[in-house]
Amino acid sequence: MDLTSYAELAVLLINSPDRLTGLEGLRALLEEGGRYRPGCRITRSDLEALRDLREELMIVFETAEAGDEEAVVDRLNSLLIHHPVQPQISGHDGERWHLHLTEGGRMADQYAVGAVMGLATMITDLGVDRLGLCQAPPCRRAYLDTSSNRSRRYCSERCASRANVAAYRARQKVGQ
């Protein structure tokens, strides 16, 4: 089971507040995360639950950035209690048997379990410092640092380029 892809669900949710304004946006978010199946029922309560989860996960990333590992673990443990894992063996799309974290319950519950369990596994395997917020002002989008040297500071190449150009221009201005 690739739990990094589950942790990416947390990042996708944090970075998509604009999609949490209605059911169509939520459907698009779920499709992008590979969590939507045709015929799946999405409700306003799913939307509200994922808005709440987004806020909780954002606090986890902010706390990780502040370097408070114990607080990150406490928050994730609380989320794990609130969203208990229900693993199931699944076979679909021509794949071999594999584990899914949950198949039952509301769509929001399924998403939450994957996102929270993915983050929990990531920090226990790689460390809390692998959760980051983009350093390019004013971005602050979340990312997972899966680099071998723990050097990621930006959510995307676009933000990295923008920050590097701004730093270069600032150096040029000082040198004049």
Image (tube, rainbow, N blue to C red):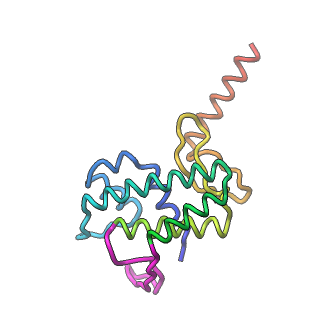
Residue that sits furthest to the top in the current view: 176
Give the quarter of the image for residue 54.
bottom left
Residue 119, quarter of picture:
bottom right
Give the x, y percent position of residue 133.
58, 47
Which residue: 26% across, 69% down? Answer: 40
Would residue 106 be visible to someone looking at this image? yes
Against 99, residue 24 (above or below) is: above
User: Of residues 21 and 171, which is closer to you in this image?
Assistant: 21
Q: Check residue 94 for magenta coloring.
A: yes
Determine if the magenta segment contains residue 90. Answer: yes
Nearer the observer, 58 or 161: 58
Above or below — where is 112 with respect to 87?
A: above
Q: Is residue 6 visible?
A: no
Which percent across, then down, holds residue 92? 38, 81
From the top left corner, tell me how far across and down residue 91 is, in percent: 40, 84
For residue 102, side relative to residue 37 (left or right): right
Count of residue discs: 0
Q: Residue at x 51, y 61 (%)?
A: 8
Name the spot of residue 173 as percent of width and height, x first: 70, 17
The residue under the point 57% across, 52% down is 61
- Classified by dominant secondary structure, the portion drawn in magenta counts as loop
Residue bounds of the magenta highlight: 84-107
